[in-house]
Image (cartoon, rainbow, N blue to C red):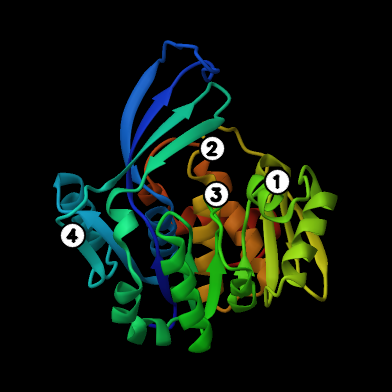
Amino acid sequence: MDKQVVVLGSCSVCHVFTAPNLPVKGETVIGNDYHIVVGGKGSGQAIVASRLGSDVYMLQRLGNDSYGRQQKELYEDMGMSTDFVYLDDTAPTGSGGIFVDAQGQNKIIIVPGANGKVSSQDVDGITEVIKGAKILGAQFEVPAETVDYAIRLADKLGVRTLLDPAPVEPFDEELYSCISIIKPNECEASELTGIPVTDAESAFQAGEWFLEKGVKEAAIVTLGEKGVVLVTREMKKYFPGIKVPVVDTGGAGDTFAGGLLAALSRDWSLEQSVRYAQCASALCVTRSGSYSLTREDEVDALFLKIYGEACQ
């Protein structure tokens, strides 16, 4: 129980279409592959954290349908707690369409389904688990008011919080003061701050904006293949991207967040945790498929190879 992580988040049945290029408005493109991956930001981050050694509890609603039942069984098979994974009779499991081009770039459409049913009452039901957690992770694929409630509760209980503000949703700016760490990508950082984030320098500016808004510890802004910046009140640091052959960028951001949750649950420093998360994300983009393909030994080996540090 030393590495306990709570993830408030979503699950979506993702229909993945690949084609040489992504269609523009009004265009039809002939694709070359189609497959189904059951993902979603919350599910993906929780699975990655679990695969990397954390003791993960997830708060989630799935549809009481074949996809939902199969996903809950998958969590159980992976050793994740499903005590707070509910099968909802009033809505289907969330779904998504993912469109990937030959360069591995993607566009995504999500329909919430049962994800939209996660409530503050559900959060109340997992309070005792949150109390014992190292960190609570959340995103905005469940209702923003539920995310707000969960983060404020965790903060009140003295539990560290990580918000991945994706997709960007309007929320009460007073929430910033309850967030320990915020982790937007460049697009989300641009939308939230009004600062066009295109490189490390503009990402530093966005990170400082988040801290000025009250974020407690750090802003971590991911820049895709360009790398990551970490901004705290004591320092600013740029981490170049890890060069790997790219097959599919889908899931890279969630794998980064899951790796970050796993590293922070080990009580690692922010710098070390960012590096570890980068290694997990780098391995993710070298293949296409499920978050459950994440392997702790592979991430640990890449971390050792690049940084010369053994994982403790």
In the image, what residue type sits under mark 3? Gly
22 lies above or below 42: above
Report if the CB atoms under discs 4 and 2 are less than 8 Å apart.
no
Q: Secondary structure at mark 4?
A: strand
Report if the CB atoms under discs 1 and 2 are less than 8 Å apart.
no
| Among the two numbered marks 4 and 2 on one chain, the one whose residue lies closer to the N terminus | 4
144 lies above or below 131: above
The residue wearing badge 1 is 241
The Cα–Cα distance between marks 1 and 3, rounded to whole angstroms, is 13 Å
The Cα–Cα distance between marks 1 and 4, rounded to whole angstroms, is 39 Å
Mark 4 vs mark 3: in front = 4
**Which residue is drawn at the image coordinates 62% and 65% (left, top)?**
182
On residue 253, which mark appears?
3
| Among the two numbered marks 1 and 2 on one chain, the one whose residue lies closer to the N terminus | 1
Asked whether residue 59 is in view, the answer is: yes
In the image, what residue type sits under mark 1? Gly
Q: Is residue 136 left or right of residue 61?
A: right
On residue 87, which mark appears?
4
Q: Nearer the viewer, residue 183 or 48?
A: 183
The residue wearing badge 2 is 249
**Which residue is drawn at the image coordinates 41% and 68% (left, top)?**
146
Image position, residue 103 (x, y; %): 58, 25
Report if the CB atoms under discs 4 and 3 are less than 8 Å apart.
no
Q: Secondary structure at mark 1?
A: loop
| Among the two numbered marks 1 and 3 on one chain, the one whose residue lies closer to the N terminus | 1
**Which residue is drawn at the image coordinates 30% and 34% (left, top)?**
36
The Cα–Cα distance between marks 2 and 3, rounded to whole angstroms, is 8 Å
